[in-house]
Structures are given as C-alpha cells and as structure tokens.
Amino acid sequence: MSDISHTFAAPLLRGLYIGAFGRPMALVPGSALGAAEGEAPEALSVELPREEGPAAGALSASLAAWRGSHGGQHMPGCVVLRSGSERRAYWPGLGLDDARRRMERRDAAPLPVPPPTAEIAGSARRRSGVVEGRIALVTGGAQGFGEEIVRGLVASGALVYVADLNLAGAERLSSELNAAAGRAAAIPVSVNVSDEASVEAMFALVAERSGGLDLVVSNAGVLKASSVLEQELAAFKFVTDVNYVGFFLVTKHAGLLLRRQARLAALWPTDIVQVNSKSGLEGSNRNGSYAGSKFGGIGLVQSFALELVEWGIKVNAICPGNFLDGPLWSDPVKGLFVQYLQSGKVPGAKTVEDVRKAYEAKVPMRRGCVGEDVMRAIYYLVEQEYETGQALPVTGGQVMLS
C-alpha cells in the first residue's frame, strides 16, 4: 500500500495553492516517479510527515523556502511528495482541464501568482458567479432536485461530482453536460450514503481526481409515507439511514477533506449544504419517518456548524417546499401523489390530480418549488460568508420562520 495517500495529501496541497491564489484550483496526480525531481527540476520537493498538522507545517515551510529562491511571485508548477523511497507528483491548474494538460505535458514551469484584487465594498455581482471555477459534489445528483442542482452548478461554471447510487444515471448526465460544456464539467461517482465505506471511497476519489472540494450538497434522500400505526420498522430505518445517518457520514468525510485544505488555506471558506425539507420545519401527517429524519438533520446542521466553523467550513440547510414536478412526487407508480392518494392523506381526494391541487392550494404563491428556487438559495448560502447553522425555507411562503 502507498505511504502517500491521495486522500491525505491532495487536499493539503490544494489548500496550499488556494491560499496563494485566493481562488479555486484543481490538482491532479501523476505517476509515482522515482526521478521526478530530475525530470522536473523546478518542482517543490517535500518529505511528507504522516500526521496532518506536521504535514501542513512541512508543506508551508518548504513552500516559503521555494518561493524565496524564486523571487516570491510564483508557485511551483509541480510538487513532489516523498515518503521513504516513494515519490508522488502533483500538478496544479486553474481548472481540471488545465491541471490535466500540465500533467500530461510534464509541465513543471513555475506559475505566476497575480496580485490580490480588493473587492469594492457593497459591490453587486451576479449571484451564480460565486460558484464559478469551484469544485462541488452533489449526492443524489442523477435525478430530481439533485439533477437540477448539478445542472445549475455546471451552468454557473463549477466542476461537479454527480454522486448517486444510480451510477448509470450519473454517467449519462455527466456525459451530456461534458459534451454541452466542451470541458470537464461533471464527474460521475457511485455512492451509497448510508454505507460509510462507500462514502469514504467517494471522497478518496475526489481527492485523487481534483485534489479537493469547495462545496458539498448533501441532497440524497428517500421518503416512504405511512401512518405511524402501520409503517414497518424496516421502512422507518431505511428512511432514517439515508436521510439522517447519510448526512452524518457525508459531513464526516467531507469535513476531514475540507479540514486538510483549510490548514493551508485558512481564509478560503467552504460549504456543506444539506437539502432538507419544509418537513424539517413542521410535522408531516402520515409521514413521520421522513419529517423526523429531516428535523434531526437540522439538529445535525446546527451542531456541525458550531464544530466546523474553526476550519472555515460553513454548514447550512435549505428547506424546499414540494418539488411537485419531480419524480419523487410525480412518478406514476411510486410517487408521492400516488402514495398519498393510497394512504388517504388527502381527505376526499379521488385522483392524483386532486392530491396535486390540494398541495398547490397550501402554498401562498400557488405553485410547487422548482430547481431555480433551490439554486438561488444555494448561491445565497455560498455567497453569504457570515451565516452558518441556518435552515433556510424555500417554500413560497408555506412555512415562515418566527
């Protein structure tokens, strides 16, 4: 087994470059080269300690010495990490395509660091621009709200990992988006958010493919509507494992990666956003397993926010209203319209259309939530650097915080 793990090393290195450039960067590994220093004489070569804090210190000290000998205005075009006899090389870039090209060319030429630019206080910018160039991951990203979020982030210039149990769906969506964008815009990855080994493997892949992340959207969720008097324990546990335990596991392993970045990019805020629900803000009749998991999710959001703020990691939730046009609701076999009709949740409803009209009538704005509504909330939370631990309603006025 390698002594230099991508999961350990790559986020630290990405933080080193973000700290210098003040913007999102990608980082890709090359082959484990024994003669990397000879092939890339301008590379920064570092003996990497095996503990996170000392490793960050060694990288920082080695970089300071390297920059001092190169005029102080450049960053290494390649970093070679050493552990005993092992060598592993990494190449940075302003995006994933740029990093890959530099790695393929073996281009280790020093990178000029542009002078910092001060933002004008109070200046306005297009809100979606806050994710341009950032690296994001969306769980449950192959369909429903997750697909809407992936499409919105890619359209706004982000590189997005499409993480889903439905790997074929994630692959189809990624291929479509990459072809349309003409760039590396989406990367499919398989994950079962209720399985820790699967979640850990997902973040290991992220570290290897791009070095790290800036935004994690924990969107994967399930719902099984039923009366508390009738629901099987297995169904209750299934909903809880995906919605509640899954969010814990995603935050745990995302947090470990983001903390490594933050050790060398302390001023670079990162975000974990849970896609919660209006059912996390008020009870839901004959839907207790779902509402309970979402209420619990907000408790996790607030608790994780207090802990991870030390590392510049903001943790927030958005609580959308009903996505009536998505498959969760409109699937003709197992969608919520069908489930609610069969369970008698809407008194007097005779058809699926009756159920839909009943739910639209509950919303002051007289419509369900759509992808654009969720995207505006995500952009706001990323842009807002002075909020953490919040649960933001996106409900058309159906749920109002007091």
Image (tube, rainbow, N blue to C red):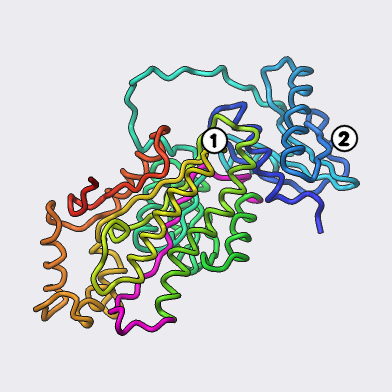
Name the residue type under label 1. Pro
Image-based side of 398 in relation to 303, left or right: left
- Label 2 amino acid? Gly
Name the residue: 72% across, 42% down: 52
Q: Residues within 10 Å of mark 1 (few under 14, many from 20)?
A: many
Q: Earlier in the sequence, mark 1 or mark 2?
A: 1
Q: Residues within 10 Å of mark 2 (few under 14, many from 20)?
A: few
**Residue stretch in magenta:** 208-233
At 44% from the left and 51% from the top, the residue drawn is 301
The Cα atoms of the two marked residues, 1 and 2, are separated by: 29 Å
Q: Secondary structure at mark 2?
A: helix
Q: Quadrant of the N terminus?
A: bottom right
Q: Nearer the viewer, residue 147 or 388?
A: 388
Toward the viewer: 26 or 108? 26
Decide if residue 159 is on the left or right side of residue 338: right
Q: What residue is drawn where x is 62% and y is 39%? A: 261
Figure check: 42 above or below 27: above
Q: Position of residue 71 (x, y in %)?
A: 73, 15
Most prominent secondary structure in the magenta stretch?
loop
Residue picked out by circle 2: 38
Which mark is drawn over residue 162? Answer: none
Task: Please tell me in which quadrant of the rendered image residue 258 appears.
Answer: top right
- Which residue matches tag 1? 24
Residue 395 is inside the magenta segment: no
Cβ atoms at labels 1 and 2 below 8 Å apart = no
- The percent position of residue 392, horizontal first and vertical second, equals 31, 47
Q: With respect to residue 39, does 236 lie above or below?
A: below
Determine the image quadrant of residue 315: top left
**Residue 4 vertical position relative to residue 238 in the rendered view, above or below:** above
